[in-house]
Amino acid sequence: MSTPNPGNGSPTPPSSSIPTVFFAHQRAAAEERKGAYPFRFPRDERQLGGKYSVAENSRRLLRFFYLERRLMQALGAWTLSIREFEVKLETGRHIFYHGDAARMLRERLNEQEMRLRDIDAFRDSEIDRFIDELLSANSACELLVGIHQVLGRALATAYHHHIDDTDPVTDAPTIRCLRRILTDYEPMLQWAEAAIAAYVEGGEPEPGLAVWRWHLQRLLASIGGVTGVDPRTEAPTPLRIDTKPFERGTVPLRDVRFDTFKNTGDYDTADQAERFPKDSYENLRLRFIRTQRDEVDAIEAFGTFIWDIRFKDFQSEYNLARITWDEARHTEIGHRALLACGYDPFELRNRLTGSTCRGPMEPAFAMAEINLFGEVGVLKTINNLIDTAAERNDELLRHIADFIRADERTHVRKGQGIIKVMTDLEAKPLEERTRELFTECLVSLGAFKKDMDVFTVSRDDLEHLVGE
Ligand SMILES: [Fe+2]
Ligand SMILES: [Fe+2]
């Protein structure tokens, strides 16, 4: 290495006390080589800078992660209690959007010097109080106001600010992560605005919503906003949770367009008439499509599980969130397929049997029923159904059942891990206890009579009576 010669050439003024040391011949040679380079690629205008250190970046992202995780859980807590079909479906989707946002932030935090164990163990009692208050909404419309207009909007704004404020070069992965989250947020928040407007046009009193919105905005401001660093204001009083702590609903609700039944799992019994002969393809086909539409109850089941097992295991919460979205899709598929078959989906009675039993139940048994009996039960018959549909050139059924089979296989696989998080029981006692609990529930609903002293419904009957 030769002795540096700062006097040789014109040195760039140093930006700090450390001088710039270059060799004139190297600089001149570099100039010459650059002159010979023929390509004028687009200029990358990003500059080094940004407001955050890795530690401050992590502190903010951890709060975002926590809020997204809490939003996923919070919406799960309300899945049974939302009446309106469209809102329940959309909420099933949003649960996954928040779960996926949490997953992406968690991954980024793990790259920003945080261990997954510490990320998952993070709690914030002020945020928890805010979430509990937001959940104490008096209606699904109030819930949307809190979730989307107050918290959702505040998060979207914070994500935009974070994108603007962080270093676009050194912290590019955070920017990409937040942009991808915002891709889900934009249609979600737009939908929520339109949905709240629809509630108001349909008679939901606007002043009550405005009072609730202002109350929650003040509560959020009192904890420093979503970043925690905004100037804190006085918290509003009283809070609803101070009078009555939040508890999730246990009864599945439907809007006025539905005609529901829970005294049986069988559609012909519920209709008190047969549309098609019992074992005919036509009957099995319609039963399958109705069951898909009636999986509106699976949104309720899996959404509720997220709430009930909250903070036990992030991966299980995330898998449940994804299954919840899938079940919202199955419901949509069923609704659309009924239309494509020439039915008004609301003329077909809606089965509430399974959800009524699962609603108040401990998650492990409710999960065992829907996963081990319901979803496994679907897989037992779906191959034949798809083959027959193909033979008969019934493209509608073949097409939808093909995708649903792939989803349900995935659910059965993921379900095994989730059940392990929910209970220490071995497979056999878990199945037995589940059958006992559902026998009790089905008897209480009048789905059948208990005519023996010791009697537990069989696995096959359970699959048929609750029917997923
Ligand atoms: Fe499903
Ligand atoms: Fe499923």
Image (cartoon, rainbow, N blue to C red):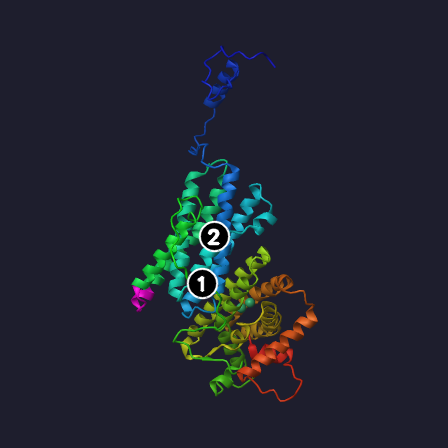
Instruction: Nearest to the eye among marks 2 and 1: give it.
Output: 2
Q: Residues within 10 Å of mark 2 (few under 14, many from 20)?
A: some
Report the label total.
2
Q: Is residue 170 visible?
A: yes
Residue that carries the numbered disc 1 in the rendered image: 91
Residue 111, horizontal then vertical, whole percent: 57, 42
Instruction: Check if residue 200 falls in the magenta segment.
Output: yes
Element carrying mark 1: helix
Element carrying mark 2: helix
Q: The C terminus lies in which quarter of the figure?
A: bottom right
Magenta segment? 198-206
Q: Residues within 10 Å of mark 1 (few under 14, many from 20)?
A: many
Q: Is residue 313 left or right of residue 78?
A: right
Q: Is residue 186 visible?
A: no
Instruction: Check if residue 171 falls in the magenta segment.
Output: no
Name the quadrant where ligand 2 sits: bottom right
Q: Is residue 428 left or right of residue 295?
A: right
Amino acid type, label 1: Thr
Residue that carries the numbered disc 2 in the rendered image: 126
Residue 380, horizontal then vertical, whole percent: 62, 73
Amino acid type, label 2: Glu
The numbered mark, 2 or 1, whose residue comes first in the sequence reads 1
As measured in the structure, the alpha-carbon distance from the residue carrying label 2 to the one carrying label 1 is: 25 Å
Residue 394, horizontal then vertical, whole percent: 50, 74
Q: The N terminus lies in which quarter of the figure?
A: top right
Q: Is residue 58 above or below residue 49?
A: below
> Quick one: which residue is furthest to the bottom in this view?
451
